[in-house]
Amino acid sequence: MADGNIPVDLQDDSSEDLSTNPTSNITFQDVVKKQLSRRSVVKGSLAAAGATFLAPAAGYARGRDAFRRAPAAEPEALLGFTPLSIEAATAEQGRTVTISPDYEYQALIPWGTPIDPNSNIAEYTGDPNTRPTAAEQEQMIGIGHDGMWFYPMNLPSILMLEQRKGLELPGSLRSRILNSREGMICINHEFGRNSHVLGKSFPETLEDVRLSQAAHGVSVVAVAESGRFGPGEWNVVSNPNSRRITVNTEVDVSGPVAGSPLLGNSAGNVPAGTVNNCGSGATLWGTYLTCEENFNGYFGSTTGDTTGFNELQAAAYARYGFSENGFGYGWHLFDARFDIANPGFANESNRFGWCVEIDPFDATKKPVKRSALGRFKHEACAFTELADGRVAVFMGDDQRGDYCYKYESNQPWRDVIAAGLSPLDDGKLYVAKFGAGPEGEGTGEWIELTASNPDIAAAGLDTQDKVLVYARMAADVVGATKMDRPEWSTIGKDGEVYWTLTNNDRKDDGQGAISDVNPIFENSDGYIIKTTDTSATTFEWNMFLISRNTRPEDPGADASDVPYAEYTAPADGGENVFTDPDAAWADPFGRLFIGTDGGQPSGLQDQMVVIDTATGEYKRLLMGVASDEITGAAPTPNYKTLFTNTQHPGNGSPSSTNFPAPFDGVTIPRDCTIVIRHKGGGVVGS
Ligand code: FEO
Ligand code: CA
Ligand code: CA
Ligand code: CA
């Protein structure tokens, strides 16, 4: 949620703005700050400094990024494109998306697009006088486009072939034979305000609530590129596996929390739905993992009581940020599931806050909540294969002062999949504790969250289902490091993990804490860190990029700032300035694609920049429209097409932008996917 350029009202996702972490977890800043001296080594390009700091991590991670393996061919130039200039970007006044002159884009699947083009449902095109019905919306693309992935249409047959042969095709071959012109897009619909979705600030009927609910969730939709011989237009195509998944879709829960009394309701309702689907991750076995972030905001209390039905729940409601009115969606007034004061649904809220696995190619399979990955405000998840064939998943919990997590499967994922089980059901969950790093680099520990840890058990979390349902509280106990809002994580080409820490300028009222890895007190611009695991329980970290250092001018420091974070003017004079990094995708060529979310400097809107991780050089590829944010990044297997999104364009108001419609000041702007392509047919980013 953009928090730099919109007024904060009840109904937004700015619970991110309010820390609910009451702990006084140790900040190593307290320990080491006194000894710090200003070191010139990290002044200048921090990104470049970061690239050389870490020794290879003894092969702990193999660096597999999703299912893509090694690329077909290196792009001619890692960052060869002409950047979108500030002048060209701002000339459009935020009314339309702008892009590098070497690139072209197309809007695809805006909110209101029927997921089956052969259905008799008409597209909702942004008429301000009407909205879809709830029943129509259930068959349409939702709103709040965020995490996404493109699954080539022939992926299942390639995976099957590999499994049958017990081998893996070479990456270059895979990249060539996987279909880059037709596939299933899985895409999250994180949120849509009532004013945008309903055309009014508050629901008046259950039908209104059902419309709001149907606009949230996930779409699985088939798309194909037209034009037989060359680049064409992307369109939705009919496919039996295209479907909507909403908060009312039946789901399964697997892993240690399955069957736990913590998920039981006396109302007897079966587990259903997913909500506030923020970022995502592509598993190594061809499925999609959608992440439930600010789920608390959809619950409310009809009595005003927010203390739950037992002591543990009272503590958890506070820690997870439940409140009387939530984010103002009003669902709880018409749908008792979302009323935390209703004893019949006493544990309904425990059914949210998970990572949920979806099979893009099988609409008959229920989405599965993978409880072993813990319950918190999941931003996104990044998968990698470890040297011994097990899978690791890196996950941020996006709130001021919350934590970075990791999951590792206990067994090699191929063996588990071959046995018909899930590698996400049997493994260990860890939380990160960052050690001191006075020069913007250091080591850290992954601390396992387990009921067999006496400190965790002593806090009332004495069984593993409790530890996982209340993962934040278990992490509090072991002294995890408070971070400046961990958003996306993504795996770099050598297995390193990049984490976007979007911003946090509220440390003065206790929402988070300053530390070497969170070095700026009034951190309104954010930063990107890099971690590299050296074992299951240890890692190295370094500050990869401080957004403040992309600014043309010194924004001013605070006396509490860690010395190494002192402003350093950028080499480009601020032409490619960006702040508030959020969405992140590392490609296999050593580049990092970043989507921003926050008020951008120099008259810019939120944007996508590309960073060369070896040199630290960065360029602006694309800019969104007024009041939107740029979310998600998903390539085709040949890397020549990239899908990203504009989320909440104009914040739903038609006065500043009507995107994807041309500017008319009237048409309701609609969240949509942006398809990006190099005019010369090159790999995106080159
Ligand atoms: Fe949904 Fe933290 O962004
Ligand atoms: Ca954000
Ligand atoms: Ca968002
Ligand atoms: Ca985000």
Image (spheres, helix red, strand yellow):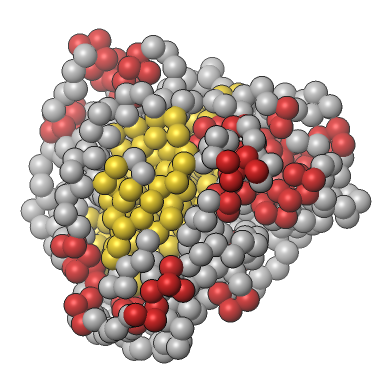
The part of the image, by quadrant, that contains residue 71 is: top left
- Identify the residue at image location x=38%, y=74%: 32
| 153 vs 382: above or below | above
Asked whether, in this view, residue 193 is left or right of residue 635, the answer is right
Q: Is residue 346 above or below residue 22?
A: above
Q: Is residue 130 visible?
A: no
Q: How far from the left and from the top, in percent, is residue 210?
A: 74, 40
Residue 28 in view: yes
Residue at the image point whose x is 81% and y is 37% from the top: 346
Q: Residue 455, located in which quarter of the rendered image?
A: top right
Figure quadrant of residue 6: bottom right
The answer to whether residue 258 is left or right of residue 422 is: right
* Observer-nearest of 448 and 68: 448
The percent position of residue 115, horizontal first and vertical second, equals: 52, 34
Q: Residue at x 34, y 61 (%)?
A: 529
Q: In which quarter of the image is the C terminus?
A: bottom left
